[in-house]
Amino acid sequence: MKDYHINLFYSDEDDGYIADIPDLKSCSAFGKTPEKALKEVLKAKEAWLAVAQAEGRPIPRALYKPVIYKVA
């Protein structure tokens, strides 16, 4: 399985970085630095997958690809 795409961006409103995984609904994290946001979203991903598995929900395939990959 390929790993999931992670979006990472700065939020003026939150005064920090947001990382999210589009293929995993509502899986996101905050950090004051890009590195911290990435570290936190990787923890959130593991928790998201563990809960889905424990509840018998299907694990989504990694499908999201930003437009930049389609253009290049």
Image (spheres, rainbow, N blue to C red):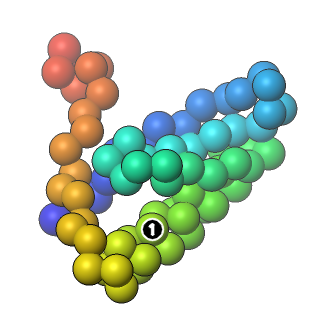
Relative to 27, say whether 71 is above or below.
Answer: above
* Residue at screen point 55% across, 69% down: 43
> Which residue matches tag 1?
48
Is 56 in front, or is 61? 56
Q: Left or right: 60 with respect to 21?
A: left
Q: Left or right: 22 with respect to 41?
A: left
Relative to 72, say whether 7 is above or below.
Answer: below
Is residue 37 something one can see in this rendering?
yes
x and y, in percent, of residue 2 in the image: 20, 58
On the rendered image, what quadrant is the C terminus found in? top left
Q: Quadrant of residue 3?
A: bottom left
Relative to 15, say whether 52 is above or below.
Answer: below
Callout 1: 10 Å neighbours few (<14), some, many (20+)?
some
Q: Amino acid at mark 1?
A: Trp
* Residue at screen point 63% across, 40% down: 18
Relative to 1, say whether 31 is above or below.
Answer: above
Counting the numbered discs, the total is 1
* Residue at screen point 78% across, 23% down: 12
Is 54 in front, or is 29? 54
Is residue 46 something one can see in this rendering?
no
Q: Left or right: 2 with respect to 10?
A: left
Q: Secondary structure at mark 1?
A: helix
